[in-house]
Image (cartoon, rainbow, N blue to C red):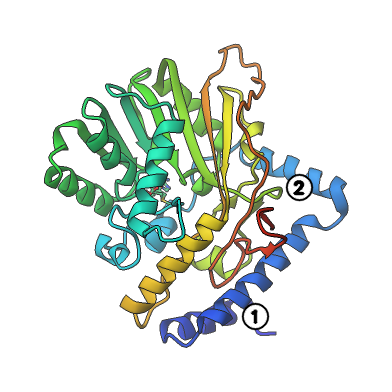
Amino acid sequence: MARPRLRYALLDRLLGAGLVPDFALRAGSIYGVGKVLRRERAGGVEAAQQRLTELVARKSRGPIAVATDTANEQHYALPPEFFGLFLGPRRKYSGCLFAGPDSTLAQAEEASLAQSCERAGLEDGHDVLDLGCGWGSMTLFIAENYPACRVTAVSNSAPQREWIEAEAERRGVADRVRVITADVNDLELEPGSFDRVVSIEMFEHLNNWKEMLRRVSTWVRPGGRVFIHVFTHRTVAYLYEGTWAAERFFTAGVMPSHDLLLHFQDDLELRERWIVDGSHYSRLASRRSTSSAASIPTSAAPASHSPTGACSCSPARRSGATGTAASGSSATTSSSPAAEPGLDSPPCRRERRGAGRDC
Ligand SMILES: C[S@@+](CC[C@H](N)C(=O)[O-])C[C@H]1O[C@@H](n2cnc3c(N)ncnc32)[C@H](O)[C@@H]1O
């Protein structure tokens, strides 16, 4: 077998030339994910618990984010027009919600954004921080649908800021939208200045969840809430390492398990958890891949990840004691597709209709 670098370079060439058919991408994905899951499950439950303990320790130290330039090169500093080729009209670069068989991508974006606002307990008049704002899907949705809300959007991408500012102007909400370009490592905000913090699919990029959550807890007002949405694997949490996806697409990323956030409650107490069935992500990946195939003949489009979990947290007692999870409406079925060439987001073997997938 060729060395990884050579294999990745070969795969890049084939993808760039449009020579990898969809069925081969899917087969490669399934193979790659199977390999990662076998690795993560090796040694039985005792070894798996040890790996989880080590992962939690690793996610509790060091800089909040690492390899930030690489993430920008791979995604966020690319021209917004590129993302227009395969994302929906709101350029939501995260999970969407397909309510029915005929739902369009535009409707699926709106449905997911509305659901997140509802689950975050957002009320008109709130000051909101959108941490890891992408091209402003949530920021602009809030500004348009909650006419007394003020939104601060943060990401480390100048093209994203320019895009959001222009869109906010065009949609007539610029007076209530502020966009900050900053690496979260260096982000400084006024303590106690937000009623809600929302973060949609940014934590997967972060290295030190504990410190990020500590800082977030200082930015929330008393009585405020934090809503975090991540894609998840049902049971296994792992780092993206040693695969094409890790090298080219998601360097320093993590696949959280549905429970991973429960281990980080020093400063925020988990109040509620939800899960979105991974079939929604599967449909999203298929839509994106269809539209990118139509519009980008010579390039592989960044595909999406997997199932999505979300939770709502509020500041814990400042004693430093770990809060207990009160997951009033948590659900247990998880799932996940992935359409990435390479192969370590989990695609799934469908078990039986309505029972989710075994990932
Ligand atoms: C997967 S995108 C999600 C975007 C958006 N929330 C959405 O749903 O469309 C992740 C976002 O996190 C931002 N991000 C990743 N690492 C970051 C860092 N170190 N500092 C600031 N923003 C970061 C990216 O620029 C991007 O905006």
Which quadrant of the structure image shows residue 188?
Answer: top left
Please indicate, yes or no, whether residue 355 appears anywhere in the rendered image. yes
Callout 2 crowding tier (Cα within 10 Å): few <14, some 14–19, many ≥20:
some
State whether label 1 is within 8 Å of ligand 1. no
Please indicate, yes or no, whether residue 185 appears anywhere in the rendered image. no
Expressed as whole percent of the image width and height from the top left, the position of residue 244 reads: 56, 70
Q: Is residue 166 toward the left or the right of residue 335 in the image?
A: left
Expressed as whole percent of the image width and height from the top left, the position of residue 251 reads: 52, 59
User: Number of marks in the image?
Assistant: 2
- Depth check: give the residue in front, 79 or 90: 90
Expressed as whole percent of the image width and height from the top left, the position of residue 211 reads: 53, 31
Label of residue 345 in the image: none
Residue type for callout 1: Arg
Q: Quadrant of the C terminus?
A: bottom right
| Label 2 close to label 1 by CB (< 8 Å) | no
Label of residue 51 in the image: 2
Which quadrant of the structure image shows residue 338?
Answer: bottom right
Residue type for callout 2: Arg
Callout 1 crowding tier (Cα within 10 Å): few <14, some 14–19, many ≥20:
few
Residue at (44%, 52%) from the top-left corner? 96
Depth check, mark 2 against mark 1: the one in front is: 2
Residue at (60%, 11%) from the top-left corner? 319
Expressed as whole percent of the image width and height from the top left, the position of residue 110 reads: 35, 47
Residue at (63%, 53%) from the top-left corner? 335
Task: Name the element at disc 1.
Answer: loop
Q: Is residue 313 toward the left or the right of residue 69 in the image?
A: right
Residue that numbered label 1 is attached to:
3
In this rendering, the answer to whether 250 lies above or below 138 is below
Q: Is residue 339 toward the left or the right of residue 234 in the image?
A: left
Q: Quadrant of the N terminus?
A: bottom right
Task: Name the element at disc 2.
Answer: helix
